[in-house]
């Protein structure tokens, strides 16, 4: 698939927020230490994707938070698609999946012509300590962010929204 052009969206809804929780082995015998809030966090958020207006009308996808058909070229953004969190070294430090893709509208808009699709995700047990992280959704290029930004709401978007 071609290069992804990720943007931070200025749309309402769920964002990518880094919170807290992970486990790691000690490599030796004995108990595995219980992770603390300072050693791990949760990455959760959403990706907004351009919708296929005609396909949504034909399928009667007209209910907010109901099913949504994405525009051609974004078919990899679907419920169950893999979400990978990478650290600064490019190592996988967390795995999750996209939830069902649902119909959404920009804040203050009521027209279905302005509708887009949104999928949320949640990746738990991401180890803290990296200066940078990246989120890779489905077959798209990773979206890189600082450790500080990984702990703030981030909304990602694909397409003309």
Image: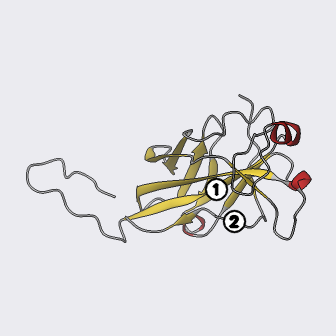
Label 2 crowding class (10 Å Cα cut-off): few <14, some 14-19, many 20+? some
Residue 131 visible in the snapshot: no
72 in relation to 126, above or below: above
How many numbered discs?
2
The label on residue 46 is 1
User: Dot 2 corresponds to which residue?
Assistant: 13
View extreme (front): residue = 60
> On the picture, is 76 further left or further right than 147?
right
Taking the image as shown, residue 34 lies to the left or right of residue 99, namely: left
Tell me, yes or no, if residue 146 can be seen here: yes
What whole-number distance in Å separates the C-alpha atoms at marks 1 and 2? 8 Å
Above or below, comparing residue 147 to residue 61 in the picture: below
Q: Residues within 10 Å of mark 1 (few under 14, many from 20)?
A: many
For mark 1, give the secondary structure: strand
Q: Earlier in the sequence, mark 1 or mark 2?
A: 2
Task: Give the percent coordinates (x, y) of residue 153.
Answer: 62, 68
Q: Residue at x 29, y 56 (%)?
A: 23
The answer to whether 137 appears left or right of 28 in the picture is: right
- Residue 12: x and y in percent read 74, 67
Q: Position of residue 146 (x, y in %)?
A: 59, 62
Residue visible at 19% across and 52% down in the picture:
26
* Furthest-left residue in this view: 30
- Residue 80: assigned label: none
Q: Answer whether labels 1 and 2 touch (C-beta < 8 Å).
A: yes
Q: Residue at x 62, y 58 (%)?
A: 145
Q: Nearer the viewer, residue 41 or 121?
A: 121
Quadrant containing the N terminus is: top right
Find residue 25 and report its horizontal and vertical position in percent: 22, 51
Name which quarter of the figure residue 69 lies in.
top right
Residue located at (81% from left, 44% from top): 51
Q: Furthest residue to the top?
A: 1
Element at label 2: loop
């Amino acid at each position: 698939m071609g290069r992804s052009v990720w943007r931070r969206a200025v749309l309402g809804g769920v964002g990518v927020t880094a919170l807290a929780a992970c486990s790691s082995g000690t490599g030796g015998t004995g108990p595995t230490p219980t992770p603390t809030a300072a050693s791990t966090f949760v990455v959760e958020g959403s990706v907004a994707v351009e919708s296929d207006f005609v396909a949504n009308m034909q399928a009667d996808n007209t209910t907010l938070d109901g099913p949504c058909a994405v525009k051609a070229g974004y078919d990899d953004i679907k419920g169950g698609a893999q979400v990978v969190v990478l650290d600064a070294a490019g190592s996988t430090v967390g795995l999750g999946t996209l939830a069902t893709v649902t119909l959404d509208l920009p804040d203050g808009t009521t027209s279905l012509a302005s509708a887009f699709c949104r999928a949320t995700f949640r990746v738990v047990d991401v180890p803290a300590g990296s200066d940078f992280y990246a989120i890779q959704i489905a077959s798209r290029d990773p979206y890189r962010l600082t450790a500080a930004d990984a702990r703030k709401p981030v909304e990602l978007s694909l397409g003309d929204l």
